[in-house]
Amino acid sequence: MSQPGLWEALRGIIWRDLLLAARRRSDAAISVLFLIIVASLFPLGVGPEPAVLRTIAAGVLWVAALLACLLSLGRVFTADYLDGVLEQMLLIAQPLPVLVAGKVFAHWVVSGLPVVLLSPLLGLQFGLEGEPLGMLVLSLLLGTPTLSMIGSIGAALVLGVRGSGLLVALLVLPLYVPVLIFGAGAVTSSMAGIGGEANLSLLGACLVLSLFFAPWATASALRIALE
Amino acid sequence: MLQAVSLSCRRGDRRLFSGVNVTVQPGHVLAVVGENGSGKTSFLRMLCSLLAPEEGTILWQGVDIRRLKEQYYAQVTYIGHLNGIKDDLTATENLMLTAALTGDRPSDVSVRDALEAVGLKHRIHHLPTKVLSQGQKRRVALARLWLSTHPLWLLDEPFTSLDQAATALVTERLRSHLQGGGLAVVVTHHEVALPAEMVQCLRLDG
């Protein structure tokens, strides 16, 4: 009998989730389409004045990214819970928090990374360019994994609960507020010419903290959910 | 050797069982029987530490499984009443990925052989499992037993949805596992068609 190495198990979890996302492309596309639609509707509603669009760009794009992430949280554990795969995951002979981190990474690749990749295009739509545009991409690159990490705790806590979609939003949105403030703040600071590095550092700190604590909290929530 | 010592279980206000003492030796299967709601599945979930007992301990080779944690999981193959397979993946992919995660490291050939051993013809191996019948999905889940090298099998209603031929195949696989020194706990409403000296029975009355 051989035990899987930690990296082997982690790679297996990530590969399976990415393969499943590739088979159910419409699921992954929904949150990206949501982001594009929200970001495209705002200029239509607010008007084409470039100065106004530039002013609201950071807030609108960050809120849209945050809601797109929230929309996709149901996919992290629910299907695995319903088909019994989650039970099997809890019995893998590797630390559960590490496996959870693998699942969250796969979730970020499917729902967060497309947001980061699309952000230059959406930023241009709002008249962002140069350093502020780069700051938007960087802030989303640091912020979206944090959103996935924090969101996974909420997704695990509401597993098997009716009306879990609304409940997870209520649980998670308050925790998203600092990330939203620092993320949008990085772009607006850059636009004001004072540089967004301080906000980026805070976003980085949020990411490190969430990487450290969220997988453990999520793993505990999963064990409770399956009892 | 697996031991349950003074095991009690309460779900909500209802006590399902208490003071259960049982020892399963290598080469033996413990058949857990009882009416619906008597706590059979809860008992099995306790044995794989998915559910904490209200009282009592479970020992693997004399050590509490709560202390062993991952070391204990490395000894267990668990197939619950849910199949634990993904509808969007093929039978082969499901088996490869699950077995790889549990440390069985199967080759393409061993996966194909396992699926054929459980009675799934080759043309089915590369179909998404969502197009398979319930019985075929159960067979995909049970094909893991042909790849498993773990000594302890914990099986929840393994014969559900299976026809007679598949039931016989799984029983035969169980027999060879026990003859190889393995042990198993099976929650079932069906009779386990193995020689009496291999089978212990635990009845839970609820």
Image (spheres, coloured by chain):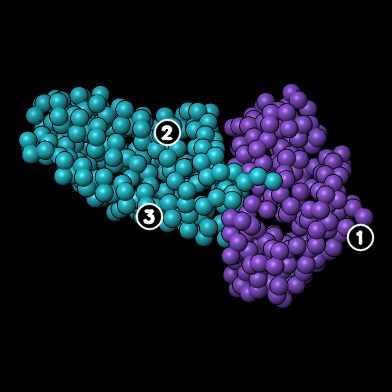
Which numbered disc covers residue B103?
A: none
* Mark-to-mark CA distance, 3 and 2: 22 Å
Is label 1 in a helix, a strand or a loop? Answer: helix
Q: Badge 1 sits on which subunit?
A: B
Residue at 63 percent of width and 74 percent of height: B55
Sequence order check, earlier mark of 3 and 2: 2
Count of numbered labels shown in the rendering: 3
Pointer 1 residue:
B197
Q: Residues within 10 Å of mark 3 (few under 14, many from 20)?
A: some
Tell me the quadrant of the picture where the N terminus of chain B can be found: bottom right
* Mark-to-mark CA distance, 3 and 1: 50 Å
Residue at 36 percent of width and 30 percent of height: A114
Left or right: A101 in relation to B108? left
Quadrant of the rendered image containing residue B197 = bottom right
* Mark-to-mark CA distance, 1 and 2: 53 Å
From the image, state the color of chain A: cyan
Q: Is residue A37 visible?
A: no
Q: Badge 2 sits on which subunit?
A: A
Q: Amino acid at mark 2?
A: Val
| Dot 3 and dot 2 residues touching (CB under 8 Å) | no
From the image, state the color of chain B: purple
Tell me the quadrant of the picture where the C terminus of chain B can be found: bottom right
Left or right: A227 in relation to A36? right
Pointer 2 residue:
A110
Location of residue B40 in the rendering, given as x and y in whole percent from the top left corner: 72, 62
Q: Amino acid at mark 3?
A: Phe
Pointer 3 residue:
A213
